[in-house]
Amino acid sequence: MQQTSKQYNDVIKKCRSLYINKLQDYGAAWRILRLPSLTDQIFIKAQRIRQLQQNSVRKVDEGEVSEFIGIINYSVMALIQLEKGVVEQPDISNEQAVELYDKHIAITKQLMEDKNHDYGEAWRDMRISSLTDLILQKLLRVKQIEDNKGKTIVSEGIDANYQDMINYAVFALIHINEQQ
């Protein structure tokens, strides 16, 4: 599991770097996005990954890696929105946005480590396509919870689903890195 922690950090380092670079370009403009908008952005990326996995012909020269990174970063943004709420104008500095990113990644990584311990790293025997399908399933769950105004009866909340999507996307990127 020591190897998983290092691999996780390596993946997040790339995602965080892109997040920081986009903050430099755009600031925290994403702070105006409502949760369903972020969920839809993640859904588009997951659907594209599934299409790439099913189709041999590609018309856009971007592969699964950039889409999984997008799923991770948009999911972190969604967790930040859950914590802070949606605003009409960006209200945080780039430094604050990075601090919030790091906070939510740390919480999500701890969840991964706890589950990884209990499940015995079962994800290592999963296919990338299965991880993609699980992300899509989580997205459908989030959409249903959003349609239910955030209410659940017995199920985990939206935040847990975003955290799981982050972790599944990290696992997929670890698998991709190991295949290269």
Image: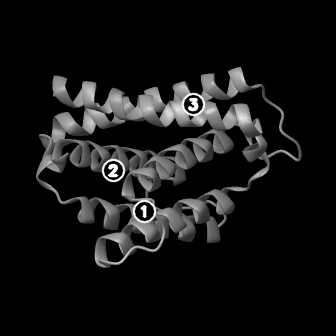
Where's residue 72, x and y in %? 47, 46
Q: CA distance from mark 3 to mark 1?
A: 21 Å
Looking at numbered disc 2 in the image, what kind of residue is underneath it?
Tyr
Q: Mark 2–mark 1 contact, CB under 8 Å? A: yes
Q: CA distance from mark 2 to mark 1?
A: 10 Å
Q: Quadrant of the C terminus?
A: top left
Residue in view at x 18 percent, y 49 percent = 123
Counting the numbered discs, the total is 3
Taking 109 as reference, is 37 left or right? right
Badge 1, how many Cα within 10 Å: few under 14, some, many 20+?
many
Give the residue pinned by disc 3. 101
Where's residue 160, x and y in %? 45, 48
Secondary structure state at the residue bearing disc 1: helix
Q: Mark 2–mark 3 contact, CB under 8 Å? A: no
What is the quadrant of residue 61 in the picture?
A: bottom left
Looking at numbered disc 1 in the image, what kind of residue is underneath it?
Lys
Q: Mark 3–mark 1 contact, CB under 8 Å? A: no
For residue 138, which numbered disc appears in the image?
1
Residue in view at x 69 percent, y 20 percent = 95
What is the quadrant of residue 14 in the picture?
A: top left
Secondary structure state at the residue bearing disc 3: helix
Q: Earlier in the sequence, mark 2 or mark 1?
A: 1
Tell me if residue 162 can be seen.
no
Q: Quadrant of the N terminus?
A: top left
